Amino acid sequence: MHININRTKYSFIKLILNSLLVVSGLLLFSQCKSTMEETAKQSAEIDGSRVSLTDAQLKNAPIETVNLAEKNIVTILKLNGKIDVPPHSLVSVSIPLGGYLKSSELLPGMHVKKGEIIARIEDPQYIRLQQDYLQAKTKLQFAELNYKRQKELNQSRASSDKVMQQAEADMNSHRITMNGLAQQLRLINISPEKLNENNIAESVPVRSQINGFVSKVNVNIGKYVNPTDVLFELIDPSDIHLNLKVFEKDINKLHVDQKLIAYSNAAPEEKYKGEIILISKDVNADGITEVHCHFIDQDQKLLPGTYMNAEIETKTTFSYAIPEECIVSFEAKDYVFVETEKQQYDMMPVTVGEKEKGFVQIINHEDLDGKKIVSKNTYILLMKLKNTSDE
């Protein structure tokens, strides 16, 4: 009998607990449903919504309206790149035979003129080279006289053909040697025509090959430089161009002679006009190709290596547009307010397209046909609408 009483109590307690769980679940569901309905109601009020202004509010925040207008909207392709120079305008200065840097006053940024001596290199081999040339020149002169003499003797049969031919071969051999040494002298900027036994130089000049400025200085006085070492880097800025990076999907929008406007991040207010001169046919692994552009007016302030932005007009479309100030953004979406009655405005979603000169293209323009669109104090309306919804 004691066991049956305990079982009865246990069943009763279990029944009460189950009932409490069911009731709690119903209360929680009702509360969640109420919260969801309230949230949906507020969302509908924001999305659907209508706002009214009193006379006092309208006086403090006057409202102006516009209608859809037909505009020519230009599609702008925005690119970036940097200023570059063609290979013939970028010179790496080296010395073909090597040697020790004797003197130079170059510093990065200094201006140089074509033919100007920018450094001097010294080495015993330069003295030997001049000596060898002068000796080869003397031997050639002797060989020419000998050949001339042997030729005259051969004509009178006082000398054999073999002796004359040997004299001619010696003369040609010495001429080859002298001419080869002369070319080596020209490589180190020594004129063989002006060289004689009285003006053998202990050092050779290094001359600038372009008009421009010094980009890099890689040596110091007394340093030995090999033929493969670059002493200086010079840049001719008169033929700079803009190298732009373009994604594969945008290549077909561009063509040679297309105009562009370029500007730097440091001075975006300074605009530079240019045009496309070459579109690369190679696309790299990242889907990017290069477009080369010339500046219409060269500016000495534009330096190679400077990063630039560019805007290119790709096409013009006839579209319906409104002023940009008509658009308000809320939760990553775009809206406009339209006047439905006096001092009463509805917020409507819009899909925007291209922007140009203060106007923005409206893709869903059919929804706004014939409507008065608020163009002034639109965010005042949005704030009042949000405040009303929060209340």
Image (cartoon, rainbow, N blue to C red):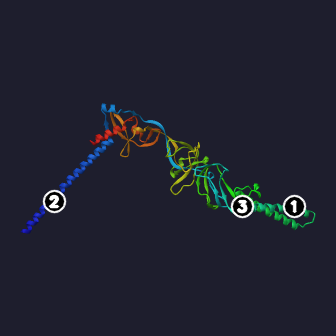
Q: How far is disc 3 from disc 2 in space, using C-alphas? A: 113 Å
Q: Which residue is mark 3?
A: 127
Question: Looking at the image, do the residues carrying marks 1 and 2 touch, with CB atoms under 8 Å apart?
Answer: no
The percent position of residue 288, horizontal first and vertical second, equals 52, 53
Residue 342 is at least partly visible in this image: no
Which amino acid does the dot numbered 2 rest on? Answer: Leu
Residue at 92%, 62% (x, y): give it: 155
* Residue 329 vertical placement versus 15 (above, below): above
Tag 2's secondary structure? Answer: helix
Q: Secondary structure at mark 1?
A: helix
> Which of label 1 and label 2 is nearer to you?
1
Which amino acid, by three-letter code, is at mark 1? Lys
Q: Is residue 309 above or below residue 357?
A: below
**Which is more N-terminal, label 2 or label 3?**
2
Which mark lies nearer to you, 1 or 3? Answer: 3
Q: Residue 14, percent across and down?
A: 14, 62
User: Quick one: 221 or 334, which is closer to the camera?
Assistant: 221
On the picture, is 53 further left or further right than 29?
Answer: right
Closer to the camera in the image, 192 or 390: 192
- The residue identified by callout 2 is 17
* Quarter in which the N terminus is drawn: bottom left
Give percent across and percent down for residue 13: 13, 61
Mark linked to residue 148: 1
- For the residues labelled 1 and 2, the Cα–Cα distance comes to 135 Å
